[in-house]
């Protein structure tokens, strides 16, 4: 991005970008939400046109970075699994008790095909309600969690 975008909140709580044409309501969209969530963020207006590009969130001044992060957090919901506590059955469907970065959760795995490998160490797990859960790094899971997960991989 060549210049730092001037961002603020409207009285209705929307993210607003100051442009040469006047203020525009925008929505941040990550280019690579899983692989590089802090890089490549587009500010898109209501018509779907890109109004600004942010190479790296860390490059923004703290107040603007906080506005973008708040907006992204309100739109995105991909809990990261930190530990598997219990699995009801090694046959599917099964209920998994997990700890996530957003607290404990019980997800229902319909079938093994709902576990997708994104890389050598990263998995995406879809529950029966369509919620996507991320395991960012298999090696960071405790031994018990890896042992439970190995039964499905």
Image: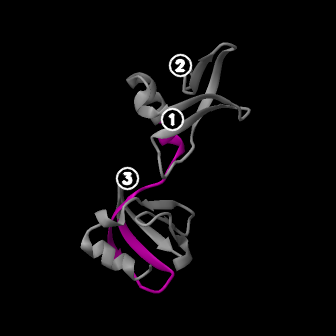
Q: Which residues are magenta?
A: 70-98
| Residue 45 painted magenta | no
Question: Circle 1 — which element?
Answer: helix
Question: Circle 2 — which element?
Answer: loop
Q: Is residue 111 visible?
A: no
Q: Nearer the N terminus, badge 2 or badge 1?
A: 2
Between 119 and 83, the one nearer to me in the picture: 119
Discs 2/3, front: 2
Q: Residue at x 32, y 74 (%)?
A: 146
In the depicted structure, whether residue 47 falls above or below residue 106: above
Tag on residue 56? none
Q: Distance from label 2 to label 3 (Cα)?
A: 34 Å
Q: With 134 as the anchor, is 110 left or right in this view? A: right
Kindly indicate whether the residue at mark 1 contacts the one at mark 2 (C-beta within 8 angstroms): no
What residue is disc 3 on?
A: 102
What residue is disc 2 on?
A: 3
Is the N terminus in the top left, top right, bottom left or bottom right quadrant? top right
Q: Nearer the N terminus, badge 2 or badge 3?
A: 2
Between 133 and 140, the one nearer to me in the picture: 140
Between 5 and 75, the one nearer to me in the picture: 5
Q: Distance from label 3 to label 1 (Cα)?
A: 17 Å
């Amino acid at each position: 991005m060549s210049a730092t975008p001037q961002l603020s909140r409207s009285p209705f709580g929307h993210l607003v970008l100051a442009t040469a044409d006047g203020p525009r309501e925008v929505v941040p969209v990550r280019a690579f939400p899983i692989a590089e969530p802090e890089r490549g963020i587009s500010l898109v207006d209501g018509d779907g046109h890109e109004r600004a590009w942010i190479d790296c969130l860390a490059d923004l001044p703290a107040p603007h970075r906080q506005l973008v992060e708040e907006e992204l957090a309100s739109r995105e919901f991909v809990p990261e699994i930190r530990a598997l506590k219990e699995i009801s059955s090694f046959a599917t469907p099964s209920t998994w008790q997990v700890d996530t970065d957003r607290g404990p959760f019980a997800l229902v795995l319909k079938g093994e095909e709902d576990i997708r490998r994104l890389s050598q160490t990263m998995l995406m797990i879809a529950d029966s309600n369509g919620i996507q859960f991320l395991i960012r790094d298999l090696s960071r899971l405790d031994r018990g969690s890896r042992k439970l997960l190995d039964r499905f991989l």
